[in-house]
Image (tube, helix red, strand yellow):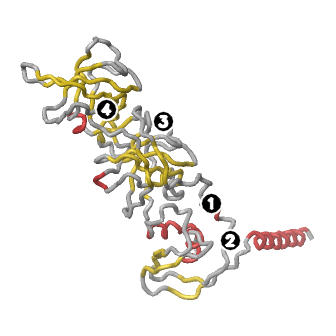
Amino acid sequence: MRHFRTVIIFLVALALLGMVTMAWSDTPAKKPVDIVQKMEIIEYNVESGDTLWDLGQRFYNDPWQWPLIWEMNPQIADPHWIYPGQTLKVRVEQGMVVYEEAPMRRDADFLFDAPEMAAFDTTFSYDTRIDEIDILSDEEIEGAGRITDNIDKQLILREDNFVYFQMRKTANVQLGDVFTVFRTQKKVMHPFKRDPLGYLVRLVGEVETVDSTTLPNGKVIYTGKLINSVSEIHVGDRLMSMDRSPVRITLKMTDLELNGTIIQSNADDDFNMAYNMVAFIDLGLKQGVEVGNSFSVWRRSPDPKNVPNYKIGNVIVIRVGDKNSTVLVTNGTRPMLVGDIVISDVQ
């Protein structure tokens, strides 16, 4: 009798399990209808409601295979978002089973939904500030001038003080020329490659050329007036010609698929970058970057085999150097860090 009761309980448990399973999955099993005879790459036109998660299920019978489709389509800047009318390439392998279409569960989509972000402005004003930091190359620093003395022998210099400065012999300095005064802070290394990328400098003021004198020994000494300052200026500070005038940044989409890294923040390596702050990326003129190009910022996955990179915001290029660019953080879901990935938003 006890054995019979155990069997009854077991059968009831199986029945309940079957009912729970049916209630949990409202998606009927997909039936195989064909087998791929050879490897080929096909094209798929995205329809309303499609996600990479869905397409992984549709083509591979496994939604977790969605990165295979993303990898084939580098034009997708954000895997959370694909749009009707887009044409995607899909690799189908020899021997792959083709399944008939069936309704897809939507309750799993939350795994890859992008969080709400502020609207990305296509045009906005950005007033370049003289108190910004910048990254200068070895060549730029070697070619910079230097404040050699000041008229009143003051230790700390500010606006309206007069200074003496020297430039390289090849510099064609004219009266009225304005130079940016800067102070070198530290050497910048790539966070992963450990290659030297230049020097982090702080821009502390501007000096206007008001006079020049050639000394008996042939040295040319210029007299300058400090026309603004954001911190104290010292004898020994460097100066160079650098356009710091206000500039209107207009979004300029690129057709180049660029991948890079945030290499330096607004201050120190561990400083979190938030909205309207400045950062630096390891892409510049040599890679084809232009002012106005926008980049999506991605947090690197701690477990790339099982977890995808995660989009955390956008930046726009406001200044381009030879090997690096200055970017402005336009929006984000969380603070950005040195080492985060940047991917160009391709038109």
Secondary structure, mark 3, is: loop
Side of 66 where 197 appears, left or right = left
- Cβ atoms under marks 3 and 1 closer than 8 Å: no
Side of 262 where 186 appears, left or right = left
> In percent of the image, x 38 and y 25: which residue is there?
229
Q: CA distance from mark 1 to mark 4?
A: 49 Å
Q: CA distance from mark 2 to mark 4?
A: 60 Å
- Amino acid type of the residue tagged 3 in the rendering: Phe
Mark 2 is surrounded, within 10 Å at the Cα level, by few (under 14), some (14 to 19) or many (20 or more) other residues, namely few
In terms of depth relative to the viewer, which is nearer, 326 or 18?
326
In terms of depth relative to the viewer, which is nearer, 253 or 221?
221
Q: Which of disc 2 and disc 1 is earlier in sequence?
A: 2
> In percent of the image, x 35 and y 16: which residue is there?
156
Residue at image mark 1: 111
Residue 328, percent across and down? 45, 45
Residue at image mark 3: 271
Secondary structure, mark 4, is: strand
- Amino acid type of the residue tagged 1 in the rendering: Leu
Side of 103 where 7 appears, left or right = right
Mark 3 is surrounded, within 10 Å at the Cα level, by few (under 14), some (14 to 19) or many (20 or more) other residues, namely some
- Amino acid type of the residue tagged 4 in the rendering: Thr
Quadrant for the N terminus, please: bottom right
Kindly identify which numbered label has been placed on residue 180.
Answer: 4
* Position above or below: 23 against 210: below
Q: Which of disc 4 and disc 1 is earlier in sequence?
A: 1
- Cβ atoms under marks 4 and 3 closer than 8 Å: no
Q: Which of disc 3 and disc 2 is earlier in sequence?
A: 2
Residue 86, percent across and down? 51, 73
Residue at image mark 2: 105
